[in-house]
Image (tube, rainbow, N blue to C red):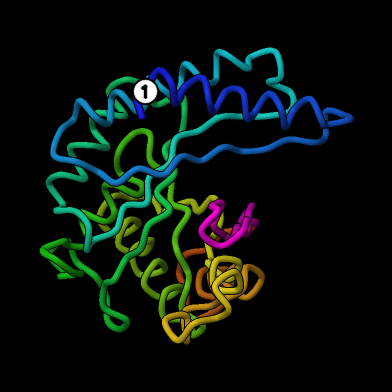
Amino acid sequence: MKVSILRVAISLVLLGILAACSNDEAGVKNTINSHPTNSEITGGVWAQLVLDISSAISGYSSQVSVVGGNDIEMGYSTATSARNWVDGYSAITNRKALYNFGNAPCPTSGTYVGTTNCSNGWTAEDVYYVSWGASASWPLPELYNTSNSNAYQWKSLSLYSKNYHNSAMSFIGVLTQLGACQQQGMPQSCNGVNNDPFSAWYQLYDALNYTNSTISQDPISYATDIRYYSTLYGY
């Protein structure tokens, strides 16, 4: 889909939602998913799209805010490609946040250093950079695992950020996929990774604030869940 068509489509969807809102307390936060590519240009195009959509619905700023988002996952991109994409976004705007709602398959024990190996050639420094180090980036991490292993990974990354970059990460919220699993009838592929939003939120909150932690964050604003919007599953 061309960017110009996508811009119009998203703007119309948001305006339709806003038209149904009865007061200024109602609102949506639009997060757009795109896999990183090898070019900073693509990240810049995405940032401009976010700015254009924000401008198109500026009359509703009391009800909705528009941000960028990217599902940055180690298995789908090299670290260099993802860092370039994030740099391209940040070069256009850091006024519109870029939420990384991807994963962090890093070690589940031990203390991280910059060269700590995570997956597919990524290091802890790389994950830190695309999630928090770049000027526009904020972490909204996947906490799919029903154990607390994902929360531990992100806690360890936040501690790394504090130790080596002088500030702990500030988490916007957490992301789960329970809705998508339920739409598919809870297939075997969801076993152990069908965390619910409340549990995921508590796992991260507990990891940051209580479990032998030297970092803390209160509050964590959002608990989010992903589901399909597709005729494939009848939704």
Q: What residue appears at the point 34 percent right and 24 percent down from the top-left corner?
A: 2
Side of 72 relative to 116 (left or right): right
Q: What residue appears at the point 54 percent right and 28 percent down from the top-left corner?
A: 10
Q: What residue appears at the point 32 percent right and 56 percent down from the top-left corner?
A: 161
Say what secondary structure mark 1 lies in. Answer: helix
Name the one closer to the observer, 124 or 56: 56
User: Toward which corner of the image does residue 62 lie, by quadrant?
Assistant: top right
Name the one closer to the observer, 207 or 228: 228
Side of 96 relative to 83 (left or right): right
- For badge 1, the amino acid type reads Val
Q: Position of residue 189 (x, y in %)?
A: 42, 81
Q: Please state the extent of the stretch shown in magenta in the rendering.
A: 219-235
Q: Position of residue 187 (x, y in %)?
A: 49, 82
Which residue is under mark 1? 3
Q: Position of residue 50 (x, y in %)?
A: 45, 25
Q: Is residue 205 magenta?
A: no
Side of 199 relative to 212 (left or right): right
Circle 1 packing at 10 Å, graded few (<14), some (14-19), many (20+), is: few
